């Protein structure tokens, strides 16, 4: 009896998911920004959330460990605010200490996909998170810490979770652990998943099917698509051969982007060279991070209200109180990180040989598991650098602040993760440049878009800011 | 002035390095086992090495930290013997402590390649390492810790090192950090590199150009090709389209292997499914490792001579004294790990749909950076399990111990890294099975050879034992 399938059942990675994604990206009508904001407003009338800043000393169900100063939940261990000691010999700052969130659990960020009339749709959620300034944002189908889904908090079951806990029963379009903010999280990873289902899926209150084109259009609205949705969308394998047969036309940058979605189109550097450069960057730095008690974090002080840096810069650790109502009522308090000022996350892009390339930076953040990840061209809080002489400001910052309007292809303010970060807003900009290969310094490389998509099948390569940016860049295809 | 090259200079990853490797694998005459052993003997007459076991208390230039019990070098920090606490909730052993080597530096393992008469040759070294029982073994061109190459020990310069410190000046065939033994090393990685040069290369005493076919033939000799050579060889990108146009014929397994070197040939599971399975394995386990003082390692005790487990099993930490002579004379002592007994490392292979697949195991070892790596089908010291009832022995061990001779395609005893491990011998076996998909349990999957080659472009996927095994498997192509 043959125990294995015959030869004809062998499979190759040629299933044209990228072409199906391209077709879905073409369908954008029927759910514009006004329409979705209307849906949010209607939903918000049935479910309110009230968020207030409170002093750290007023946190309930959280305590400050008397020995270490760490801020811990009384019952669960799902996240802790503690300290970190960072040594980067030879780096611009060789040594520092800071508070950081340690959350070793791997959560699930998942989107269900399903074809309707031959077009892939994605089940998106209108979700409130306490850190968002504007209430509801467009979120993945599921956004669950392990504490959520093992229900250590005795909350209600997470809807749709089973599709992601038993993905083998469905078609897995993407499934990869990715990092989150390495400056605020110690080695946090979430599992980014997209599964395609064929059976009926009940659409619960607060959920809605959208095409990729509709989501793309929503991405250009300020503060509407949340970070978790962006990172899952970035992991869609949207590059492959023949995308130009589905998509064409549009402006020069769109044509260049479409060609850059075809992995056979080539690149300035071969993928082998890109991987060798990443290896070199990772071997050349001795980043040593060590978790320490929060009360040993020098340079920061704790007031009744918050933990702040003595310069007033960077971020604060604050408390918030949340009241949510609707089908269920909940009250809770929690610590959060509040950055000082709105950040700028910028990506320089350029048509090189007909193929859109992006300028990525190999970036050290203390919370990364593997030394560096690739970030966007610029990532900073400009206000922190205004006092500095121009030579000490982040490289390429003027390319964004002084960009001519016709070179700006994306310019939207978006929130970072609203479950841990309070009003963490970044201005995401995509700017076309005609300055070329001379922009490549040691830590910067021009990478073709299809190369980034290939790297995103694996962990540890693209930072969450780069992934957000890639989702924004992909939206230009619609 | 155009700052970037015109469109026609864009490059694609189609340069047929895999076909050039296939041609090199065909050339095996001119350097047989007897010939290389003769070269070793001749070289050994000019350079002797004497290695003796000594008590740990007799180590010179090393000291035991009075507070922690850790064994450290007096001057450098290049490696330390300390302790580790490991928790694997739900694992077969849920918690244990053990000694481990902590060596955070990333060393370089590099091979220079160069074409002679249209055939790629590799510059290999006859090298002694103290842990090898038989003196010289075939080694990469360069095998250097960072302490070596920054010369903190004031040793002589490492020959050929510059080819790897400035790889951008040459063609990089492979460049990836890979893990080493996760049971004995805490998060050790080495940079595995192959660079192709076109200029003249002086061949120093103790070095020799060999084709891939010659190296492949040598791999089947007991204890001749060292671990560092095997891991670098495994990182050669030997799979790609059209290998069958260069190689053909031979037995059934060779035909199947040749087809499995073609990435267009398909696989039982798509690469997306394989990556999703690895993600699932890594998310499903909460491995928590913590470095602890060596004197807090319960279950082990330190005698005058060595650190041993109270059961007498697993491994010991011993001391060795080394005297080397030749062009330079050197004496030193160092701690080493000596395993108890010869191990068995076994790979089950099978033709599935005309394409050779191997059965890999997702394996937890405490020193891994990222939870699990893919290992061979079996990896154990059989002597440790003889007393156990059959159900508690390592899965698939009988498939190797009781394999019929005509199903055994590789069976050679090889050494692990001789710089840190003393007489660490493993029997490497490749066995063909006709049992099929039913062998896939949670932690085991059939993977096509070309899929393993693709994963090896990235860190954290294949363990050092799996990589050694892949080099042995590839040798069957010659």
Image: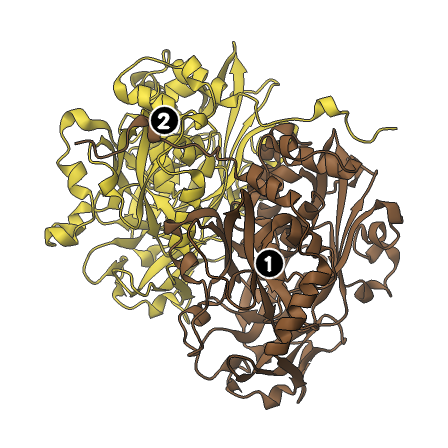
Chain colours: A brown, B yellow
Dividing the picture into quadrants, the one containing residue A341 is bottom right
Q: CA distance from mark 1 to mark 2?
A: 43 Å
SS at badge 1:
helix
Residue at x 62%, y 66% (from the top left corner): A417
SS at badge 2:
helix
Task: Give the x, y percent position of residue A91.
Answer: 69, 56
Q: Which residue is mark 1?
A: A229
Residue B242 shows which numbered tag?
none
- Which one is in front in this view, the residue at disc 1 or the one at disc 2? 1
Task: Give the x, y percent position of residue A387.
Answer: 87, 66
Q: Which residue is mark 2?
A: B474
Residue at x 36%, y 31% (from the top left corner): A10
Instruction: Give the quadrant of the C terminus of chain B.
Output: top left
Front position in the image: B436 or B214 = B436
Give the class, few, some or many, for how many residues have Cα within 10 Å of label 2's Cα (few <14, many ≥20): many
Is B69 left, or right, of B111 in this rendering? left
């Amino acid at each position: 009896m043959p125990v294995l399938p015959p030869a004809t059942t062998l499979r190759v990675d040629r299933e044209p998911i990228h072409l199906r994604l391209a077709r879905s990206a073409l369908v954008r009508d029927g759910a514009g920004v006004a329409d979705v904001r209307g849906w949010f407003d209607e939903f918000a009338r049935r479910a309110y959330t009230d968020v207030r800043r409170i002093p750290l000393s007023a946190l309930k169900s959280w305590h400050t460990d008397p020995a270490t100063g760490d801020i811990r939940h009384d019952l669960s261990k799902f996240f802790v605010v503690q300290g970190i000691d960072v040594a980067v010999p030879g780096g611009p700052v060789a040594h520092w200490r800071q508070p950081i969130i340690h959350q070793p659990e791997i959560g699930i960020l998942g989107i269900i996909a399903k074809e309707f009339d031959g077009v892939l749709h994605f089940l998106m959620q209108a979700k409130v998170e306490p850190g968002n300034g504007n209430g509801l944002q467009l979120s993945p189908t599921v956004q669950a810490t392990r504490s959520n889904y093992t229900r250590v908090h005795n909350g209600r079951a997470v809807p749709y979770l089973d599709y992601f806990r038993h993905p083998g029963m469905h078609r897995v379009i993407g499934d990869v652990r990715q990092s989150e903010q390495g400056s605020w999280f110690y080695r946090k990873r979430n599992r980014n998943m997209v599964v395609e289902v064929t059976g009926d899926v009940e659409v619960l209150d607060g959920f809605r099917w959208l095409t990729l084109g509709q989501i793309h259009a929503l991405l250009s609205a300020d503060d509407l698509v949340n970070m978790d949705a962006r990172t899952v969308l970035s992991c869609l394998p949207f590059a492959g051969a023949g995308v130009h047969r589905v998509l064409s036309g549009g402006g020069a940058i769109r044509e260049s982007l479409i060609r850059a979605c075809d992995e056979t189109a080539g690149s300035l550097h071969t993928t082998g060279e890109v991987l060798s450069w990443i290896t070199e960057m990772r071997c050349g730095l001795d980043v040593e991070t060590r978790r320490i008690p929060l009360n040993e974090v020098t340079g920061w002080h704790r007031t009744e209200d918050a933990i702040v840096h003595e310069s007033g810069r960077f971020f604060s650790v604050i408390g918030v109180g949340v009241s949510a109502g609707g089908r269920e009522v909940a009250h809770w308090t929690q610590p959060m990180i509040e950055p000082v000022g709105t950040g700028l996350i910028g990506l320089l892009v350029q048509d090189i040989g007909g193929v859109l390339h992006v300028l990525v930076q190999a970036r050290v953040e203390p919370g990364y598991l593997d030394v560096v990840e690739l970030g966007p061209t610029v990532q900073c809080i400009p206000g922190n650098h205004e006092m500095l002489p121009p030579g000490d400001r982040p490289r390429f910052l003027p390319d964004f602040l002084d960009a001519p309007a016709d070179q700006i292809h994306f310019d939207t303010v978006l929130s970072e993760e609203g479950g841990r970060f309070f009003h963490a807003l970044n201005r995401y900009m995509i700017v076309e440049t005609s300055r070329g290969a001379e922009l490549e310094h040691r830590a910067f490389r021009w990478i073709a878009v299809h190369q980034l998509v290939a790297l995103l099948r694996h962990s540890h390569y693209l930072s969450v800011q780069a992934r957000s940016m890639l989702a924004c860049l992909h939206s230009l295809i619609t």
